[in-house]
Image (cartoon, rainbow, N blue to C red):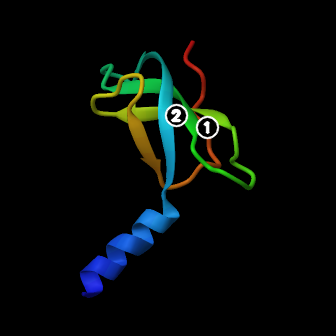
């Protein structure tokens, strides 16, 4: 019962976003993908915002991201 409650609290903190464009591979070994994602917040500061983030693991357009925080943006690739 406590485990279920903990999962719900974590989901409340995470903001959802959808990958709208894959910008390229980055990281020293090319193991990180830089993506532009649109935040799915209905109201508040994050409504209709797009941010650039680095994603580890497989990522393609249309994928959903669970972002623990939406303040920081990734530096653009050179």
| Percent x, y of residue 59 | 34, 27
Question: Depth check: 33 or 11 in front?
Answer: 11
**Secondary structure of the residue carrying numbered label 1:** loop
Q: Quadrant of the N terminus?
A: bottom left
Q: Give left or right: position of 19 versus 32.
A: right
Residue at x 34%, y 81% (from the top left corner)? 5
Mark 2 and mark 1 lie on one chain; the one further toward the N terminus is 2
| Percent x, y of residue 34 | 47, 25
- Tell me the quarter of the picture where residue 24 sits: top left
| Percent x, y of residue 7 | 33, 71
Question: Depth check: 64 or 76 in front?
Answer: 64
Q: CA distance from mark 2 to mark 1?
A: 6 Å
Compared with 13, 39 (above or below) is above
For label 2, the crowd category at 10 Å Cα-Cα, with few meaning under 14, some 14 to 19 and many 20 or more, is many
Compared with 43, 2 (above or below) is below
Q: Give left or right: position of 3 versus 41.
A: left
Which mark, residue 25?
A: none
**Secondary structure of the residue carrying numbered label 2:** strand
Please name the residue that numbered disc 1 is placed on. 73
Q: Quadrant of the C terminus?
A: top right
Residue that lies at the very extreme toward the front in this rendered image: 42
| Percent x, y of residue 54 | 46, 33
Residue at x 36%, y 23% (from the top left corner)? 60
Q: Give left or right: position of 13 versus 2.
A: right
Please name the residue that numbered disc 2 is placed on. 53
- Tell me the quarter of the picture where residue 76 sits: top right
Compared with 5, 63 (above or below) is above
Q: Do the CB atoms of the residues marked 2 and 1 lie less than 8 Å apart?
A: yes
For label 1, the crowd category at 10 Å Cα-Cα, with few meaning under 14, some 14 to 19 and many 20 or more, is few
Question: Depth check: 43 or 75 in front?
Answer: 43
Residue at x 60%, y 28% (from the top left corner)? 75
Compared with 24, 1 (above or below) is below
């Amino acid at each position: 019962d406590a485990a279920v409650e903990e999962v719900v609290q974590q989901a409340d903190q995470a903001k959802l976003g959808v990958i709208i464009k894959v910008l390229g591979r980055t990281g020293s070994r090319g193991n990180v993908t830089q993506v532009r994602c649109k935040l799915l917040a209905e109201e508040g500061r994050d409504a209709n915002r797009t941010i650039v983030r680095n994603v580890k693991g497989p990522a393609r357009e249309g994928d959903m991201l669970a972002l623990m925080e939406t303040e920081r943006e990734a530096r653009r690739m050179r």
